[in-house]
Image: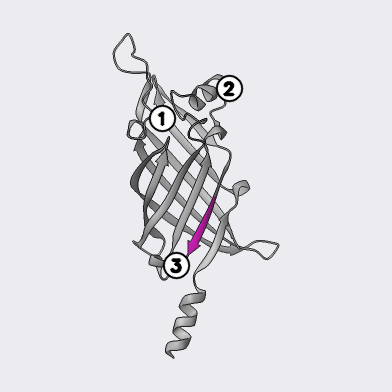
């Protein structure tokens, strides 16, 4: 009985690759009196998933900083510059998990290191597991979502412009939303 239990647990750890075509990385930040929304178009990641043994689960996620897209070419170029992401020196944003804790059947806290512009900070992502399904081609897929707000200045994104009426052009808090579908490898 013990050998069967061990085998079941071992085979329950599965590897999934993020499907970029069915996933998205979005952000929003206050700009003057509204919010600017954007996305990153190029990213990849691997999820090691053991739903019944979350301590065996992990995630690595990499975003190509130059793929930033706010639907405004001049703004996107400014975001790629030294004032913000400095993509020549820091071409990627990364998240590497260090611990996964189950909060409920569908919710997990994923603690790890978020690195932006070469600055690494420990963050905890509140992840919702959306479920598992087979696609029409027989591939097993899983879905996850998370949302996190970070202070951009904590990661060295310091540029701003003072307003005549007081305050600044760009807000400090950036809301990041990730919706990921991953396919079993």
Q: Separation of disc 1 and disc 3 at Cα?
A: 33 Å
Farthest residue, direction front: 89
Quadrant where the C terminus sits is: bottom right
The answer to whether 134 is drawn above or below residue 121 in the figure is: below
- Tell me the chief SS of the magenta region: strand
Q: CA distance from mark 3 to mark 2?
A: 41 Å
Residue 132: horizontal and vertical position, in percent? Answer: 54, 63
Name of the residue lying farthest toward the right: 137
| Mark 2 nearby-residue class (10 Å; few <14, some 14–19, many ≥20) | few
Determine the residue positioned at 69% across, 62% down.
136
Q: Earlier in the sequence, mark 1 or mark 3?
A: 1
Provide the secondary structure element on which disc 1 rests.
strand
| Residues at circles 3 and 2 in contact by the CB criterion of under 8 Å | no
Q: Residue furthest top?
A: 164
- Pick the residue in front: 95 or 8: 95
Tell me how far mark 1 sits from mark 2, CA to CA.
17 Å
Percent across and percent down for residue 141 are 58, 61
| Location of the N terminus (image quadrant) | bottom left
Residue 29 circle label: 1
Horizontal side of 99 relative to 82 (left or right) equals left
Q: Which residues are magenta?
A: 45-49
Residue 73, which numbered label?
2
Kindly identify which residue carries mark 3.
51
Residue 70 on image: x %, y %: 53, 28
Residue positioned 33% across, 18% down in the render: 168
Q: Residue at x 45, y 42 (%)?
A: 177
Which secondary structure, mark 2?
Answer: helix
Which mark is nearer the camera, 1 or 2?
A: 2
């Amino acid at each position: 009985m013990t050998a069967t239990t061990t085998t079941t647990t071992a085979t329950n750890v599965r590897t999934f690759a993020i499907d970029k075509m069915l996933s998205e990385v979005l952000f929003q930040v206050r700009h003057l009196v509204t919010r600017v929304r954007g996305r990153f178009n190029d990213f990849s990641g691997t999820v090691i998933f053991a739903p019944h043994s979350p301590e065996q689960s992990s995630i690595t996620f990499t975003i190509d900083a130059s793929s930033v897209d706010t639907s405004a070419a001049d703004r996107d170029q400014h975001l790629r510059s030294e004032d913000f992401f400095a993509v020549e020196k820091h071409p990627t944003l990364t998240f590497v998990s260090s611990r996964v804790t189950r909060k409920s059947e569908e919710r997990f806290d994923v603690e790890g290191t978020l690195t932006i512009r070469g600055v690494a900070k420990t963050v905890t992502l509140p992840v919702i597991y959306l479920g598992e399904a087979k696609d029409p081609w027989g591939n097993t897929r899983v879905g996850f979502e998370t949302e996190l707000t970070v202070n951009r200045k904590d990661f060295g994104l310091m540029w701003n412009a003072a307003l005549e009426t007081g305050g600044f052009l760009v807000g400090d808090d950036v809301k990041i939303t990730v919706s990921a579908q991953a396919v079993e490898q």
